[in-house]
Amino acid sequence: MTESFRRSGEYENPQGPQGDAYQGAYPQQQHASSPVNPEWPPPPTHQPTQQPATDGGQGGYGGGGTAVLPAVGPEAEHPEHSAHAKKKRPRGPIALLAAVAIVAAAVGGGTAYAFQELTGKNEVVSSSTTTSVVPSSKKGDVATIAAAVSPSVVEVNATLSNGTSTGSGVIVTSDGEIVTNNHVISGAQSVKVSTSDGKSYTAKVVGTDSSKDLALLKLEGASGLHPATLGNSDGVQVGDTVVAIGSPEGLTGTVTSGIVSALNRDVTVSTDEGQQQQQGGGDGRWPFSFGGQQFNGDTGSSTTTYKAIQTDASLNPGNSGGALIDASGDIVGINSAMYSASSDSSSSSSDAGSVGLGFAIPINTVKSDLAKLRSGSTS
């Protein structure tokens, strides 16, 4: 590395091995008899006058101030060249170190947060790699994940024409954008949202996408909320540890854990508002079908199918719209469907329970749909 820097300097300012710039940069190698590297550039056309050093090789570098070594090389005629060379030579290493520092900062993470601070916008906090949500020493620790992410999960209560619907949601911006399932708020006359600290907000429906069973809410008068970090669901593997947070049966902030038991499951849910209300009512047991079988009632004739993450983390009525979280604390899915032990639509929600078969919409699907939801689309 030292040799490469020396060559760089010599290419910029060709000179003899006894030139002022050479001595300033390499004072420990100023002996007059130092050999010339044959790979260096040829000497200048003007041959310097040879004169032996009389200060023991320290002339021009503070060797007592008694012996004077005449200037040699092109710098003798143009001293400003030597000063320019002294100033210019360090720019190579310094510029290189600065560039390396910038690249390291970008690769090291935190770019999403930096962009948010520079632009001053409430952007979704996203991540495709590791994050600082959970310290590396606590990765996979359910208690740590729950403490870090619970403030980013809310309870959603929708008032319907025939009752109420309870679900969950995930905060995606600090000023109150909430992602939830479309079926949680479908047909709602009003929506209330409760945060983990007990505060209650009125929410308006910004946009819906029944084909993906997603909806975006906006809280009125909210600020300083804790947005979740949206991860990369493409990196999820079968067997990965996951944590689910939601409000099953209205029990806000309930935490369960398990693993990813399968990927890319074709889950079919109803897109008919009337069908959902008739079958699910207010008990949260939304009908869906999988593998040609109907669960939690009949989905009807108007349906949509999406690829889902399957998990054995316990999900119950009220978990819909809540967070499925990986070992690093990143949101990798929005919980959307669970198999109920009771398939009789006349049964109450108390007859239903988790049997370890739940499904979540991959978070990459959510991120790709956010722009559409923010535009006010109601498909």
Image (cartoon, rainbow, N blue to C red):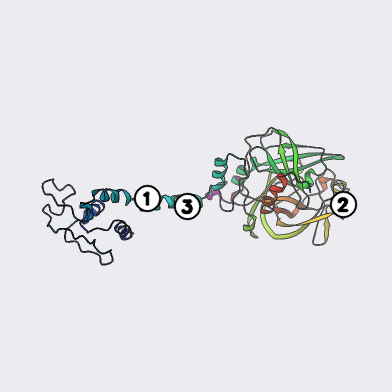
Residue 323 at x, y percent in the picture = 68, 47
Badge number at residue 344:
2
User: What crowding class fits label 3: few (fewer than 14 Cα within 10 Å), some (14-19), or many (20 or more)?
Assistant: few
Q: Secondary structure at mark 3?
A: helix
Q: 247 left or right of 225?
A: right
Residue 137 is one of the magenta-drawn residues? yes
The amino acid type of the residue labelled 2 equals Asp
The residue pinned by badge 3 equals 103
- Please give the label number shown on residue 83: none
The residue identified by callout 1 is 94
* CA distance separating discs 3 and 1: 14 Å
Closest to the camera, between mark 1 and mark 2, is 1
Q: Given the image, on which type of amino acid does mark 1 rest?
A: Ile
- Give the magenta-colored segment's residue range: 136-143
Q: Amino acid at mark 3?
A: Val
First in sequence, mark 1 or 2: give its number.
Answer: 1
Q: Residue 360 at x, y = what percent?
A: 71, 53
C-alpha gap between disc 3 and disc 2? 59 Å
Give above or below for 133 relative to 199. Answer: below
